[in-house]
Amino acid sequence: MAPTTLFRSEEMSLIQLYIPAEVAQPCVAELGELGKVQFRDLNPEVNAFQRAFVSEIRRLDEMERLCRFFNTQIEKAEIPIRPLTAAAYGSRARSAQEIDDLEEKLKEHEGRIIQMNGSYETLQRRYLQLTELRHVLRETGGFFEQAESRQDTIRNSMDEGDASTPLLEHDVEQQNHDEMGRLNLGYVTGVISRARMQTFERVLWRSLRGNLYMNSAEIDEPITDPDSDEVIDKNVFAIFAHGREIINKIKKISQSLGATLYTVDDSADKRRDAYLEVTGRIEDLNNVLSNTSQTRRAELQKIAENLTSWTTVVRKEKAIYHTMNLFNYDVNRKCLIAEGWCASNDISIIQHALKNATEASGTNLPSILTELTTKKKPPTFHRTNKFTEGFQAVIDAYGIARYREVNPGLFTIISFPYLFAIMFGDVGHGFLMFLFALYLVLNEKKLAKVDNDIFSMFFSGRYMVLLMGLFSMYVGFIYNDMFSLSLDFWKTGFDWPTEYNSTDTIEATPNGNVYPFGFDPSWHGSENFLLFSNSYKMKQAIIIGVIHMLFGICLQVYNHVNFKNKMFIWLEFLPQILFMSSIFGYLTFCIMYKWSVDWWALDENGNHIHNAPPNLLNMLIYMFLSPGNVNPEEQLYPGQGPIQTILLLIAVVCVPWMWFAKPYYLKAQHNKHHYQSVAGDDDVAYDEEQNGHAGGSNEATEDDEEEEEFEFSEVMIHQTIHTIEFCLNCISNTASYLRLWALSLAHAQLSSVLWDMTFKIWFGFSGVIGVIGLFIGFAMWFSLTIFILLGMEGLSAFLHTLRLHWVEFDGKFYMADGVKFEPFAFKTVLEAKSE
Amino acid sequence: MSGYNLIWVFIAGVIASAAGYLLTPKGDNQTVIRTIIIMTIACCYMSWAITYLAQLHPLIFPKKTGLRPHLE
């Protein structure tokens, strides 16, 4: 059993569990709490509706629906739900009795809530209707009085031409009813939404040809419509017309347009009585409504206390039954057979958990765990802790590692913050970043519960940001850049002249001292600082890039050894590394050599010993264009010509080596294997069948067939692509590392411009203006530092570092075609559902 | 101040890495801690060494204009 390291994924074993049917549920619950086994589906042909535990799942589905219903009700009533503490997650498995009880309780609660909701709605509707009626009663009083004075318009179409008594001239209360009846003057009163008022009037006018008198008044307050539950403005209307047919027509039209009709008595006394009665009823209803809502609230509060734990229990049970559906039910021995992947190092823990579950349930039937040998490809499992998790996630986003291949996540822990720091190097900014990450780390437990998506992204990378801050501070000291200012701790390596005028350009002279750590502060503020620092940063980027990529190529060796392909070290690794080293390794060497030579050194006579310092870029280009010819005036070291020719030859030889060696080797292997396996074919087939008995026999024969299948042309094409890709990538990836220079230049320039433009300009002022100016200037400088330099530049550098890791580094050795290990764990089930 | 400082510091780095390698306690995180220590020493040394090497024999010297006259 291999020890646990992050270097490669864990060794996985295929285990088979025999669980007696009685203890199945507790055992699976225990395994769910443990979260270390990924179960395989042993019934792939079975439809989801035909599986063994469908009825239980349906029951639990119903219970989950009830919980969701409670959830929405509680949220509508704005009652806070008590969240579950972390300890409660680890609650024990529920027995079947407890699930039944829970179901009963849920159904009971549901019944009560639905009842209360229903009665509340009915009461609410009644209340609204009464409110509208009250408005109608109020307003129509005015209408009837107005109708008195308008009786001429109505009477015009009537037969009684000389009816001397005008309709409503006399005392309205006494004669109203009779006269109305005599003249067939009917009225329709009701309420309609203000938006529909115009349409209503127009339709009525058109259909009744103007034989009506309509009056309306606005209701001041917006009313909640009882049917649609919206708050809208309404108008009261009263329509006076004669003839029963017309009245019926009016009623039909108003109902079709969504008006609510209310009958109103035409005598003012009766209307007043009705008004008082309605007001009284409204008071009563109000009381009843508030009582009902209070009771409902109390009920919901009671539910809210337990809702989270109920929901958790229901979800866990559902997950358990879903998992049990994957098992094979052995009728003869009344037990369930489960198959799954788990880490080999975890087998004893799993056995222990099973034993606990069996003991807790009180039976004596043990569960048996056996390991199977198999040729199937296991899932990849990296055992991470809270520190390494963030880095591993970054690599997994690119691709999951193949089973047992080298894990780049281990090296990312340091190389990621380092490359980030090269692009971000500033002591001040690094320190601020470090403080931010420190806050996140120290308040881990509290901040883990925050729900915001963007925040949780930063939170999950808190250790990465911590290291990024630390490295940025270190590289900031090296670049001697602290909020764009330089620090001078040690004696500088340059001496400045003391005799000069203000208009002169003065040049410093070296005094033999080398600034021990980082950039010499004499460079700060000089005109040609960029000339020096650009050259330095570009060369540094190339050196770091070449070393990073060579390291990536070297990691191949481990993969070849681990997958029993030692020959590939000679066929693939060696030509790759020779190609890379002979061109770019040589370039790195030249960079470092050129730096180590004192080009301006004078001999005893005062003459220069060396020629002028050569341009490295030209040197590399001419190495390819005219190999072997090196101009003595521009040589880097004596003997350069022949050495460069040899290196070029090595590189040229490597290309066909990479291209043809591996396919021909594989072909030779295949031929040899083919002859051997024809003889031993029968034995091999029987062995495979015995091993994969629980549904695995298909895969075994597939493996056999795979080995037989070897297309030389396919391998050749694949290798061609691989070779071309590698050779071109050598150049492009090396150049790609120049982004380390580009971003650090941008950062430094931004930082210095920000300082100069927002803060430094205020130093010249004094007095009140100076004070206020400095205050504003600092505010601007600090907020822009946080948002632009830390936020924007930080994200940008992060992205570029990510790209460098994914493409340039991982591309050299990482296969990334694995399957992730996803164990059955309640934690993941609960987290997934809550999203 | 000479180029040989580079070599002394390199040797010091190697010794520190070896010490880190040998002295990490056994356990689940041994590989991680070892990798962190060795890689940090390597990266930090590389950065420092490149900077030091680049300034050993400078090819150009700083120029400044518009300075106020030297006081002393």
Image: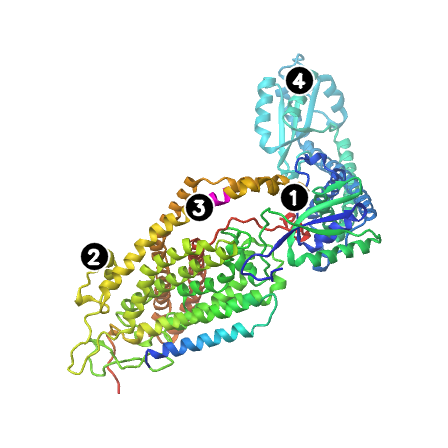
Whether A443 is drawn above or below B11: the answer is above
Along the viewing direction, whichever of A492 and A275 lies nearer the viewer: A492
- Considering only order in the chain, which callout, 4 or 2, is on the residue closer to the N terminus? 4
The residue that label 1 is drawn on is A692
Q: Residues within 10 Å of mark 3 (few under 14, many from 20)?
A: few
The residue that label 4 is drawn on is A246
Q: Nearer the viewer, mark 3 or mark 4?
A: 3
Q: Residues within 10 Å of mark 1 (few under 14, many from 20)?
A: some
Magenta range: A667-674
The residue that label 3 is drawn on is A668
Q: Residue at x 49, y 56 (%)?
A: A559
Amino acid type, label 4: Ile
Q: Residues within 10 Å of mark 4 (few under 14, many from 20)?
A: some
Label 3 to label 4: alpha-carbon separation:
103 Å
Label 1 to label 4: alpha-carbon separation:
87 Å
Q: Is residue A213 visible?
A: yes
Q: Nearer the viewer, mark 3 or mark 1?
A: 3
Q: Residue furthest bottom?
A: B72
Label 2 to label 3: alpha-carbon separation:
39 Å
Left or right of B24, for residue A829: right
